[in-house]
Structures are given as C-alpha cells and as structure tokens.
Amino acid sequence: MTKYLPREMSARLVQASRRMPVVVLSGLRQSGKSTLLQNEPALAKGHAYRTLDDFATLAASRSNPEAMLETAVILDEIQRCPDLLVALKHVVDSDRRPGRFVISGSANLALLGHVSETLAGRAAYFTLHPMTRREIHRKTDHTPFLVNFIKSPTLPTSKAAPVTDEDVLLGGLPPVCLGPTDAAAEWFRGYVQLYVERDVRQISQITDLISFRTLAQLTAMRTGQILSISELARDAKLTAATAGRYLNLLEASFLITRLPPFLKNRSSRLIKSPKVHFTDSGLAAYLTGIKEFIPGQDDRLKGALYETYFLQNIAALLEVHLPDAHLAYWHEQGRHEVDFVIEAGRHVYAFEVKAGTRWGENDLSGLRAFLARTPACVAGILAYNGRESVKLGDKLWAIPMAQLIG
C-alpha cells in the first residue's frame, strides 16, 4: 500500500462536511481519494467505509440501496451504482443534517447525464487532482507562492530547484511518484488495462477497446494542443461522432481536461476551440511511449508534457486555495498565444510555460500581446525552468516554474 501523505484538499472537505449533508470527492483513479477519506480523522470518524469496488457491497447497494444509508457512511466508487444516488437524495431530503455522507468516485458525476442533477443543492463538490509538487515534497506548511503572487505581485526572495524530467515523466499519481521509479512503466501498463479500460466499460458500453485505446494514445500525443475532433477522428480512423463520444468518456473519467479559451479581450481573431490536456503528465508520457526526453527528437512533446505538468499543479492549487478562480488559455489565430490564463475576481494573470532554463524575446511575444490587448491583466509571467526570478518590465516577469507551483 502506498504511504499516505496529507493532502491539502483535506481541510476544505472537512469544512464542507460541517455545512452540507453530502460531500462529493471525485478525481482520477488512483489519485488518492480512498486513502485520503480513510486517513483524514475528521472525515473518517463516525463514518463506516464502503467501497463499491467490492462485489458484495455493490450487489447489496443494487438490491437495497436504502439500507446502505441508514448510518453515516463514506461510499467509494459510487458511480458504479447510480440508483444509490437516487436513494441518497430521498434520505437527505428527509434529514439534512450536515456531514452524514461522503461519496467518492472516479467518474465526474456532473458529466454523467443520468445522475448530474440528483444531488443539486444537497452536496458540495470537489476534485482531487494528482499530487502536487508541494505534497510530494511535504512542503504544504506555507501558502503557495502563486496564491501570494496573485494577491500581491512581487518577486520571490528565494531560489527554486528546477523541475526535472523525472518529475514530469512520473507525474503525480501516488503509487508512481511515491514508489520506486523503475516500476513506473509496469504500473502504468496495469493501470491502463485494469482501471481505464474497465472503468470505461462500466460508464459506457464500449466493445471496441482497441479503437478507444488508440484514441486515448493519440489524445496523449496532443496534450497541450488545441482540440480538433475531426483531425483526431481521421487519425484514429473513427467517425467524428465516435471520437467525440470517446473524448467525453475520457473527460468523464478525469483522464483529460478541456481548457476553455479566454475571450475577454480586444482581439477579433481568437481561437474558440478548447485545448486538451491529460490530467497527469506521467500517464500522458506513458501513452506516448516516452521514457526519457531525447534532445532534438522529443522537443515538442517535452514542452507539451512540461506544460501539462504545470497545469496539473496549478489546477490543484487553485482548487484548494482559490476555488473561484478560472483557468483558460489564449490564442490569437496566426499570431500569438499564451499557455494559461488565470482569472481571479477582476484581475487576470497570463502564463507562458517554457521547459528550458533560458529564454529569448520570442518567448515573451505572446505575453506582451496579451498584456496589450487585456486591460484587466496585471501580470504576464514566463514560467521557465531556471532558478532566478526577474522583473522584465511593466507587468512582465520571468519566474521559475518550480517557484510558481511550490
């Protein structure tokens, strides 16, 4: 069993359980949901733990769902029994005491049509992302630099150790990033076979798993790119409708995320399609077949995987510390782009990610264009993989990637 490390999400879950009758924790398989729920004393105390991965528990839930809800309980992998959610709704409607039920699942209930509205107004929803760099290195005792920077943009006073290729290739799933690194490929192989293919079959009756896995691999190769379903369908030799359905399943299983475009500025040539990112850089690297980055051969994918790694970290930080902030990207057709845009209240922050330790003027062109077109933008940040933080001009900064996610 993977050693448990405290997760920053715990405090928010505990707070929500004091206000709402149901707390919902979703996220990618093996991101640590079950471990968190069983090891966080304030959540586990007074609750029975039941997982629907257990066949007997699943059978009992299907035959008599009300009996599973007679006491305070943590219900894991609840997407396997949608009828249980209907029963939960009726129980909560008759007794709305807070903190009675904690449910968890590796499918996004909001994206599954048959259960999306069942708990509306009755539950608080949270997503557990892969482990952050802070959590892995046990440095969660201080407010993240990014959160402080958003409140007051100032240069950090300390240096940061660069992100390594190994950090990116391992990602943030606990059995990999906390386990022996030489076993990562074997673990990912089993993960894809046992969880991805099995879970997908449970969510939707897919019979052609070979085509689904091909689509997943092609999507991994496009992590960090603007999504073109027609192009993806052509390369996978699928219809656009089938490719779209497979992408929806990848998203519902938290394997990918679609990053929306930022459209609130003066440009008239904005790309309006979403970007697609894998949720975990390690899983994306495995599906693309990359075990190490070879200079001159894997440069594009290296940049994309570093970008994905940066995203999974800042998404987790925002989920815990700035839950009302919004993430997007910006792309002006044929001209400029910015990898990430954070909208926090009335202020906007733009980030360009660079895997290298040095930068040139070309690396700043997108940030400069975005600043010129977006009056609400208070800072454009080049997140590069060096050690020094530098102010490059009015509202323009170069800050180490590791500093921003630490």
Image (cartoon, helix red, strand yellow):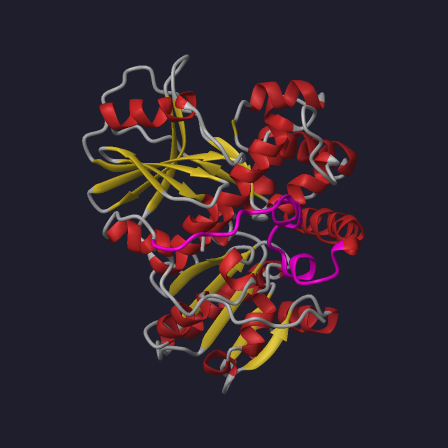
x then y, percent, for residue 101: 47, 74
Would you say 174 lies left or right of 73 here? Answer: right
Q: Nearer the viewer, residue 174 or 369?
A: 369
Kindly identify the residue that appears in the image at 68 percent across and 20 percent down.
Answer: 235
x then y, percent, for residue 214: 73, 32
Which residue is outermost to the top? 334
**Does residue 258 lie above or below 152 as drawn?**
above
Would you say 200 lies left or right of 227 here? Answer: right
Kindly identify the residue that appears in the image at 75 percent across and 52 percent down.
Answer: 184
**Does residue 335 lie above or below 138 as drawn?**
above
**Residue 161 can be seen, yes or no:** yes
| Numbered label tally | 0
Q: Is residue 378 magenta?
A: no
Q: Quick one: quadrant of the N terminus?
A: bottom right
Q: Quick one: quadrant of the C terminus?
A: bottom left
Q: Nearer the viewer, residue 166 or 228?
A: 166
**Residue 113 can be seen, yes or no:** no
Q: Quadrant of residue 272?
A: top left
x then y, percent, for residue 11: 40, 71
Q: Quadrant of residue 297?
A: top right
Kindly identify the residue that appears in the image at 46 percent across and 44 percent down.
Answer: 401
Q: Is residue 172 magenta?
A: yes
Would you say 254 lies left or right of 23 here? Answer: right
Would you say 110 lies left or right of 182 here? Answer: left
x then y, percent, for residue 392: 30, 33
**Does residue 34 lie above or below 264 as drawn?**
below
User: What's drawn in magenta, residue-wise?
Assistant: 157-181
